[in-house]
Each structure stands twice: as C-alpha cells, then as structure tokens.
Image: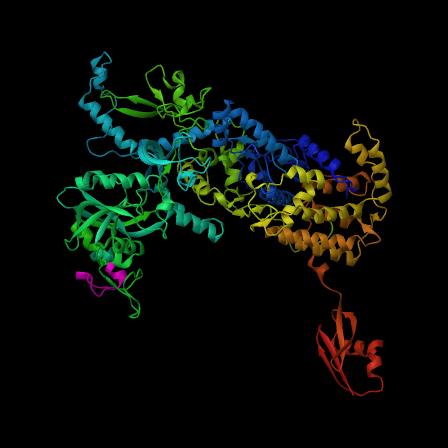
Amino acid sequence: MSSSRRQYPFHLIEPKWQQIWDEQQAFRAFNPGEEIPSDHPFAARHKLSGKVVATQLPGKFYILDMFPYPSGAGLHVGHPEGYTATDILARYKRAQGFNVLHPMGWDSFGLPAEQYAVKTGQHPRQTTEENIATFKRQIKSLGFSYDWSRELATTDTDYFKWTQWIFLKLYNSWFNPKTNKAEPIETLAYPAGLEPQPVGRASSRAAAGDGSSVASPHQDIESARRVFCDSKRLAYVSEQPVWWCEQLGTVLANEEVVDGKSEVGGFPVVRKPMRQWMLRITAYAERLIQDLDTIDWNDSLKEMQRNWIGRSEGAEVEFRIQNSESRITVFTTRPDTLFGATYMVLAPEHKLVDQITKSEQRAAIAKYKTEISKKSDLERTELAKEKSGVFTGAFAINPVNGEKIPIWIADYVLASYGTGAIMAVPAHDTRDFEFATKFSLPVIQVVQPSDSKTDWQNFTGDGVAVNSGFLNNLPAAEAKKKITAWLEEKGLGKKTINFKLRDWLFSRQRYWGEPFPIVWKKDAAGNLYHEALPESALPVLPPLLTDYKPTATGEPPLARAKDWVNLPDGSVRETNTMPQWAGSCWYYLRYLDAKNSGAFAGKDAENYWMNAVEGCKLDSSAPQLATSNQQPATKSTTPGVDLYVGGTEHAVLHLLYARFWHKALFDLSFVSTPEPFFKLVNQGIILGEDGQKMSKSRGNVVNPDDVLVEYGADAFRLYEMFMGPLEMVKPWNTKGVEGVYRFLGRVWRLFVDEASETEFEQAETVATEAQKPGELLGLIKLNAAVKDVAATPAQLKTLHACIKKVTEDLDGMRFNTAISAMMVFVNDAITWETKPVSVLREFLVLLQPFAPHIAEELWDKLNSSRITHHSSLGYAVWPKFNPELLVESEIEIPVQVNGKLRTVIKVSATATQADLEAAAKDSAEVKLFIDGKTIKKIIVVPKKLVNIVAV
C-alpha cells in the first residue's frame, strides 16, 4: 500500500466477508432433492428448507464461465474480465429470486505440465495441483460468488471416469441417417451375408474344443462383421495424415501448428500417416448448422461456426483415369462448368498419387511431397501465394466430352477437404486460372457473364453456359440441374451436399491425458482389432512413470509401462490418450451434479438445470419502497446453460466439439436438450498498458495481486467493468483504477461517521495480530445523517432513476454505464443533509453485484445499528423502479424577449399556455425589458420556450 491514506479499509473488509461467505457456503446452488439448511440465506429468501422437489424450487439461472487452464504463471488482469461480468449477473439474478448455478473448475490436462514433467521428472499432477491452488487463491480473492462445492478438475479421477464413459457411449453408437440421430450399435443393420449368427450356434473355435486359433469361414465372417461395425461407429480408428512433432512426441491438430512449427515450443512438425482415433462429428454437420437458429448467439459467432462446417451443395463427378480401372471422384459446386475442365489436381497425399505417377515423374513427385509436408493447411491454401505443383504423367477422361486432361498434384488441394481432388476450370476459378497461367494449361470459356462489358476470363460468377454442348444458353442454375441429372442418368455422378468439416482427430501421443478405455486383441487370423472395456473397469488410470518422453520407436509414453499395457488375457491397452478438448466438452454437465458417483449427472438435476422445469415456484417477494410496473421474473424458460461467457479463441472448436458431444448424448437420451448453451457472449481482450497483448515476453503482464494490494478487489472489479463494453478490446491502465477506487471512498463516506473512522485508524496502528478484523471495523459507526425517516420526492426520484438505469443496463450487459449511474446517485446523495435508510438500503442492493465486499460491510452496519432488518445482502430482493416517481413535477422554461434569452422560469409540468404567458410576464428579469413597451405577440412552444415580442 502506498503511504497515502486508504479511501476505506478494504484490506480488512474483503477477507472478512470472503471468510463469512465460505463458512456459510453462501452461494451454494441447491438441486432438487437436496437438503436445504434452514439457516442458509437461500432458505430464508425463498422460505424453503429440507428436501424439496424441482417444482418447489424457484426458476433456475445457470451462468457459466469458460473454465481456465491453470498455467504456472497464474492470472493476469485480463483473465478475470469475463469472471467479473458473470459474477455481477449471478448476484443480480439471485437478487431477482432465481436459483443461480455459478460454478468454477479447471481444464487441467494440458501440454505445458507434461513438458515440465519431461524436463524435471516431476509428475504433471503435482505441477497441475500447485497451479490450481494459485489460480483458486487469486480467483477467491476477487470475491466471486462461485458455488465451490461443485468445483472440479478434468484431471480428477472421478471426473475423467465419466469422460471415458462418454467415449464408450460414442464408441458403442452409430449415426443412423434414416432417423438422423445416434443409436446404440446394437441397432445397426448388417448387409446380406454378415447378419448376426443365431443365438446358441457354436463358433468354430468353440467346436474345436481346444482353444485353437485356426481361422474358419465363420471367423472370416465375424472379422468382416467387425470391420463393417467399426466403420459405422461414432468413435473409430483410421490412418490419417497428421502433424507429427518429434520434440513434443505427439500429434498436433491444425490449429496447434503455426508456420510449420508447433504453437507450443516452436518445434518443427512434419506430415506423416499414423493410426488415430477419430470421432464422427461430420455425421452431425447438418444439425450443427441448422440448430444455430435455435440459440441466442451473435451473428458473427454463428457465421464462424457455419464457415468452419462449410456446407456446400453441388455434385460428385467421376473421372476415369486413362488406361486404368481406377476413377477419381471430385466434388464441385459448379457442375455446369464441366465442359471447361482442362486439367485435374490431386492433393499430394491422395491415395492414387503413387499408383498413377509415371516412372519419369516419380522423383519430382517425391521431392514435392516432402516439401509440402512441412506446410500447414493455412499456408497451403493461402490465396496470395505463388502456385506450385507437379505433373504426374497420367491423364483422366472428362466424362462430358471425352477429352483427355492431365492430372497434377498441388499443395492448394487438401486431402482433408472434399475428396482430395478437383477438376480445374481455369476460365472461371481464380486459383485454377493462376495455376493454368503458370504452367501453360488450356483455358476454355464455358460461362458468359450477363454484362457484356465483363471479361469472361477469370469470371467466377453466374452467367449463361457457352461452349458446353447440351448446356449452351442455359442460365447457371438451370445448367446445374440439367448436368446433375445427366450425370446421375449416366452413372457418372450424383447430387451431393459436401461439408468442409472433417472428423475430429481424437488421439494424442502424450502421457498427461485421459487413457482410452480400449484394448487391442488379435483374431484367429492374426488381425488386430479393438474392443471396449466394460464400464465396471472405469476409470482407467494412467500408470506411474518416471520418464514422460515418447519411446525411442515413437510410441506414446504410456507404452513404457509394460505391466500396465500388457493384460493377463493377452490383450494390450491403447497407449494413445485423449486430447485436452475431451474434458472441456462436457464439464458444464458435471457441474450439475458434481459429487454423483453413479452418473455424470442425475436425471432430476440435469432436467432442472438444463431443461427449464414447468411449474417452478415464482418468487413473490416485492420491495417495500414502492410499487413498480415490473413483475417478478424468476421462472426460466431457457433450455441449457442460460449464459456462457468466454474468449473468442474458443469461438469455433471448443463450442463445436461440445455441441457435438451434447447432441450425441441427447440422441441417446442422457440429456434433455439438443443444445448445451442457449446464450453465449465473448468478452474482449484486455491489452497491456502498451496496447499490446499481455505476455511475459513483452514484459507487460499486470498481476491482479498487485492491484488488490493497492486498491482492493471491489475497485478491481469495478475498473474491469468500467473500462468499456464487455465485448470490446481495451488497454489496461492501472492509474484508471484510482478513479473507481475514489468512487468507493465516496460510497464509504456517504454512510460512515468520519470521527469514528479516525478512531479506527488510531486503533489499527496499535492493534495486535490476535484482534479480528471485525473488532476493528466495529469501531466505525454510521454517519449521524443516516436516519430512519421518509425519503423526500427528490431523493426518491434520484434513487429510482438509478434503479431504472442499473436494472436496464444489467439486462443489456452494459456494465460500464450501470456504474456511471451509481456514480451519479452518490454524487447527489452525498449532499443530502438527511440520508434516509430506505434509500441507502436499496442503493446497496444495486451496488452489491459490482462491489460486494464494501456493500456487505455497509449493509451489516445498518443491521448492527438496528436501523434495518437483518438479512443477507446477497439474497436481498432487487428493487423495482416506480416510473411515477421519475415524472418531473416542475420544468424549467427559457424566456426570450425579442429573441434574446432573458431568464429561465420554473413552472408546473402541467402548466397551460396561459400559465406560461403569465409566469413569463411576471418574471422580474423579464419586466426590465418589457415595461413601457407594447407586447405585440407572445410565442409559446409548449414545455420548451416562451418568446415575448415587445416594441
């Protein structure tokens, strides 16, 4: 603390109230069927105790923060921005009478802890738990009203047991295109010849009687059935070209690769094919797009999701390879341009490349494939980059005209999008045109722009088909329909909807992640196959290791634990682990019932918090100060999480993955809503004082601990919200905290007696450590001007203007202007000779969501002085404004004489034109300019102006 006097004793007030809230479990949210203690403030507010059913509880409000990864650096001042906003709203909703669920936990699996383990040998759990302790201390010091009884960490065994359980549900399910939903794998219909064996029929191995492993026709069928079944599962195995980082010893997702290097550590990465677990998110692509219309997210966020999913309508077309039985299938949104396809391009990773490449081109192809293996997908598809590619030496046949066209490979075609192959129409596609120009490939016009002045070359819009045989003179839309029908009739293609979205690569070659509940076995023919462990085997715990690096052969670290990997029955465990995304896909569901050992969430709890229960009790509490035009609104009709707040960095992947898991669980009847997050808001970034993103390397990180020592948590919270709109990017300015800190000092002086504060300060200088903060704070008395008297009309008007503004701004999440409204109130109230308790009490209810510690202390002083009834401020009823009190009884009217302002008069707001004329003429200031003159005209603009024309 600086040597200057504190504005108020926040250093004692804040730890005092944080301890009280902890001891009371003041912000605990109660589930249906849970015991509600009769002395809990929730029980007092809602007149409930004991076990109650959902319909007896008030309406729910589930407000959720994107839970943090607990890094070793702890919080910086940018992290609590969203937490502060949600806490203000959580406290506001409690005051309105909702049963508020506001939890916090830790996204605690992560690569940094594993990298630290590789360097030091310290188990990542120890590092993680130390980091969690730091984060929790910092978050609790800010006075957030979290229900800590529901705290969770994705690394807790009783948490990731259920992550593994959900994976098993995905593994044991398939997506039925007829019902458009996931179903248990037992409902899968097998093709002819692979139908299930009748019950009771002995297997060949059983018939042998000696456990022999001789393969049989029946076993071949069993193997084929298994392959078919596995190809339909929502969780399946596939060999995929992935980003492999040797130094990190793991596969990285596309978003974890920047400029050919790992985002973490900056290590080189290369493309290589590896066996990976995949989740079939593509089956949900259509629903993921359609259901965006059912949720309250902003348009830009929805558009980001739509663009990532990338829905496009077109046709699949088959091109026969010359002198080969193989065919190349391409997807195109412009089948009407088929006559203009003059070459084809395959992704360098396409499975046909090696097969079709001519011997004289093999060296060039191999060199090119090596070069592009170091590029990210973003780099490869960069529009501005120079085009590159290599001719394979092979040709394809254009199905519409029989023309022979060359087949190239190029980096701008990705194996992960569409079919990994394109037909190139250089006349009407920018990238194809640039490629054709560089390599001198033919360019044939097949679309004529409707505007004759527009050059057809490189024209990518719709027009009229030309040079296109039976499509000539047709508009693009009709040409598309006609060519698609022709392709289907000839068996050369079909109408198709394609998605840019790819299945979710779900494997990581790391130690610090959830082990898969999967084992590998061999059938009689020696073929490897995977099998799920029974649910009774969960949780599958990772083995203890001393070396967390991948093995010398490139296997994941878990492969080092031979005793753990090799099971007594000869099967071996899966040694990949799940990605960090797994635990964050469903944590909002575990919060609903965090201590339930028999399910990830109980049915009653899930239905109450996620599926707006009909008949929930309405809160009939009403403020005593005045009547209002507002009605209590405590019955939630919002399905899912009512409000989810987090950073834009999770605008696509986390939200997409969580929505996918939730929809699968919904299909399987484990959750009651099709979408997890009804309303979502992204907070903006808080930059360093230099206007740059905060980072240790820039040296511009501001630790909230330092701010709290100087100004306290309430000032910190207020400044975080006063900086500007929540969603905007804002630079931090520590000097700016001083302004809101002084405001809180004015709030303090509005209530307390200055002489007693001096006595407190003197006592504090000689106080012993044994003295409790409450004893010292008890020396501070209320200001004698604070009295239990009726408020004047002017005082009520000031209060109700503040109530109206703060309420409306909180509903609109305009926190900065709500704070401004409270500043206006204090500036007026501090001048009052008498300060009515009824007004101050209502003001503290408005203040407490923003600055809960000082508000609680002042509320307590009102209680201690027996001026107001004793209750918990955190559950006090939110005041309602009375619009009648905001109506002006008097108005000020400017008066002009001959067009020049001479005075301003006060009149009744209901004054007539005659009243205004009389009052204006009676004004002493006006008489100086009209006495002795003749009044020719009096112009009256009602409630605005009086102008007297006198000569």
Q: Is residue 821 above or below residue 527?
A: below
Is residue 767 rendered to the left or right of residue 493? right
**Residue 623 visible to an observer of this rendering:** no
In which quadrant of the rendered image does the C terminus lie? bottom right
In which quadrant of the rendered image does the N terminus lie? top right
Q: Position of residue 877 (x, y in %)?
A: 68, 45
Q: Which quarter of the picture shows residue 475?
A: bottom left
Q: Position of residue 701 (x, y in %)?
A: 60, 41
Point 84% across, 44% down: residue: 754
Residue range in magenta is 464-479
Q: Position of residue 943 (x, y in %)?
A: 71, 72
Q: Looking at the picture, tell me which residue is in the foreground, 90 or 133.
A: 133
Q: Which quarter of the picture shows residue 707?
A: top right
Residue 873 colored magenta? no
Q: Position of residue 566 (x, y in %)?
A: 36, 17
Q: Looking at the picture, tell me which residue is in the foreground, 224 or 58.
A: 224
Residue 473 colored magenta? yes
Is residue 359 rendered to the left or right of residue 623? left
Residue furthest left in the image:
323
Q: Looking at the picture, tell me which residue is in the foreground, 876 or 142.
A: 142
Q: Is residue 328 above or below residue 897?
A: above
**Residue 175 visible to an observer of this rendering:** yes
The image's colour scheme reads rainbow
